[in-house]
Image (tube, rainbow, N blue to C red):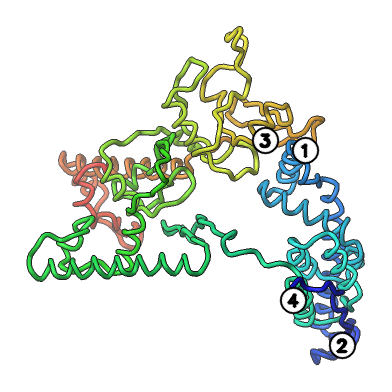
């Protein structure tokens, strides 16, 4: 039976005592007029000023909001999100969230916004409330606004506010129809919080389906592990020994490793639908010193994801072909490759992907492996190629389809500068202009310096050896006398490593 609509509860949320400077000092047993008392008073006022400042920021952001329900305004919305992202130095996705929250706060929840403006509602509380109402209707948000604004926000403690907000939110959840588990099926990629070379594939779905998948993986792992154990005991060929580790180590793969390998190597069944081959190869950029084992600087997988040095060396060792990419030793900029036609060559496209692993538009985080366009910064003139922009790396970049459409519509205008930087003008008329430096290999300057230092030290030891061979060292000692420990510096500690230097330069 459908639930009968009722009004949300309206608890009387009041503090026992009004929060003031004096009440804080009494509650904390702080001596009035002491340095601690002055600090507490200052913190109280700074917290209230933070609320007022945040309210001014929301008031500035709210006019940038454009209704998401109107598809004809998509370009306007993207243009404004990009302008706000540049101005606030964040990503376009975060800028979109901030604009939406500002609109909700100022337009749909004015009562609590007034409490924020007055300094009564801490920023963290207001942000928590906005997050709690994101999936509510406009009418429900208005109800939350009226109820929360009636609370004693200037004095109630934080735990009381959180409990009351949680209770209010749970009431609306009971009134809402819960989504069916089948509608929540999803597979999403989550990057590790640490640059440890791992990522997570999260699979969400109805409990019976997920449990069935987990049990099938368990049964497969246990069965293969038992077969591997028997093969080891009887000296038979070892099944599913993917990398030869079982035969080499004399022990079976763990069930966790077998579950992973089974899932990773299972052929995907798409019901006869042909899946196109990847448009691009996957690039792993490995610094040359890392390849040689002389440095542990991480590599970059597809230009974005850091890989530990040893993992990069293992990947390189397994590949039959390496592609050399030259970088400027001063700033790490990838050096250009030549091309003279409208459609970029395959080599140019791969080089562009090194330069732009993410969309070249400022503040955009979308990757350019797929769903991206190779775009001429200065448009190519098909009627008169000599008058238009050339098809060269200096005049090319990669944009995701949204920003490519914005550029085509004249909403964003990039201009490539002589030094390789790009000046972007966003909006028509212009809302903001920003300059984006060219992306380079961050490790190149470090490695160039290390190579030069290594070479100079090698030359220094080589010259010493030559001086020793022709008797120059003996002549200097005879002329200047033996070393005086009171006046001469101690012996060079690198002398102990002479055998290493005699092997020649490390490259």
Foreground pick, 493 / 213 = 213
- Marks 3 and 1: which is nearer the front? 1
Q: Is residue 362 above or below residue 346?
A: below
Residue bearing mark 1 = 73
Describe the element under mark 1 as helix, strand or loop.
Answer: helix
Residue bearing mark 3 = 435
Q: Is residue 229 above or below residue 492?
A: below
Spot occupied by residue 346 in the image (x, y as percentages of width and height): 42, 26
Residue bearing mark 4 = 166
Foreground pick, 100 / 454 = 100
Spot occupied by residue 361 in the image (x, y as percentages of width and height): 63, 37
Q: Is residue 244 above or below residue 503?
A: below
Residue at 34% in and 50% down: 267
Q: CA distance from mark 4 to mark 1?
A: 35 Å
Left/right of residue 78 with respect to residue 104 in the rendered view: left
- Marks 3 and 4: which is nearer the front? 4
Choose the circle earlier in sequence order: 3 or 4.
4
Describe the element under mark 3 as helix, strand or loop.
Answer: strand
Spot occupied by residue 69 in the image (x, y as percentages of width and height): 77, 45
Q: Is residue 222 above or below residue 311?
A: below
Residue bearing mark 2 = 32
Q: In the rendered image, which quarter contains the N terminus?
A: bottom right
- Please, which residue is most extreme toward the left here? 235
Residues packed near mark 3 inside 10 Å, few (<14), some (14 to 19) or many (20 plus):
some
Q: In the rendered image, which quarter contains the C terminus?
A: top left
Q: CA distance from mark 2 to mark 1?
A: 58 Å
């Amino acid at each position: 039976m459908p639930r009968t609509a009722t009004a949300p509860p309206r608890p009387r949320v009041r503090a026992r005592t009004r929060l003031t400077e004096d009440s804080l000092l009494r509650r904390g047993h702080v001596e009035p007029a002491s340095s601690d008392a002055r600090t507490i008073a200052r913190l109280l006022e700074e917290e209230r000023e933070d609320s007022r400042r945040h309210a001014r920021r929301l008031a500035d952001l709210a006019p940038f909001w454009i209704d998401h329900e109107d598809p004809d305004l998509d370009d306007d919305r993207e243009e404004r999100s990009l302008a706000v992202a540049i101005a606030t130095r964040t990503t376009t996705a975060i800028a979109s969230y901030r604009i939406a929250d500002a609109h909700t706060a100022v337009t749909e929840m004015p009562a609590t916004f007034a409490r924020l403006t007055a300094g009564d509602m801490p920023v963290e509380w207001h942000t928590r409330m906005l997050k709690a109402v994101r999936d509510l209707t406009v009418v429900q948000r208005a109800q939350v606004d009226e109820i929360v604004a009636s609370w004693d926000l200037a004095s109630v403690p934080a735990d009381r506010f959180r409990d009351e907000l949680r209770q209010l939110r749970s009431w609306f959840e009971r009134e809402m129809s819960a989504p069916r588990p089948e509608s929540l099926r999803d597979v999403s990629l989550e990057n590790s919080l640490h640059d440890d070379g791992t990522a997570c594939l999260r699979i969400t779905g109805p409990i019976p389906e997920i449990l069935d998948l987990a049990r099938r993986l368990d049964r497969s792992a246990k069965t293969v592990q038992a077969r591997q154990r028997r093969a080891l005991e009887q000296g038979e060929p070892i099944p599913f020994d993917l990398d030869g580790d079982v035969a080499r180590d004399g022990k079976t793969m763990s069930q966790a490793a077998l579950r992973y390998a089974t899932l990773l190597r299972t052929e995907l069944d798409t019901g006869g639908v042909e899946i196109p081959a990847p448009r691009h190869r996957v690039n792993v950029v490995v610094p040359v010193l890392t390849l040689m084992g002389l440095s542990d600087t991480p590599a970059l997988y597809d230009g974005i994801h850091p890989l530990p040095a040893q993992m990069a060396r293992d990947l390189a060792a397994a590949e039959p072909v390496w592609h050399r990419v030259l970088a400027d030793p001063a700033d790490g900029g990838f050096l250009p490759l030549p091309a003279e036609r409208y459609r970029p060559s395959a080599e140019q496209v791969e080089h562009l992907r090194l330069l732009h692993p993410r969309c070249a538009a400022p503040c955009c985080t979308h990757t350019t492996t797929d769903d991206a366009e190779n775009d001429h910064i200065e448009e190519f003139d098909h009627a008169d190629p000599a008058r238009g922009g050339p098809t060269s790396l200096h005049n090319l970049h990669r944009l995701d389809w949204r920003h490519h459409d914005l550029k085509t519509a004249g909403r964003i205008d990039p201009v490539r500068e002589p030094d390789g930087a790009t000046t972007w003008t966003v909006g028509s008329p212009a809302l903001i202009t920003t300059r984006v430096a060219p992306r380079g290999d961050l490790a190149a300057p470090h490695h160039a310096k290390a190579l030069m230092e290594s070479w100079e030290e090698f030359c220094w030891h080589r010259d010493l050896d030559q001086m020793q061979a022709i008797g120059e060292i003996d002549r200097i000692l005879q002329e200047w006398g033996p070393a005086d420990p009171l006046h001469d510096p101690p012996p060079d500690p690198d002398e102990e490593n002479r055998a290493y230097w005699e092997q020649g330069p490390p490259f």
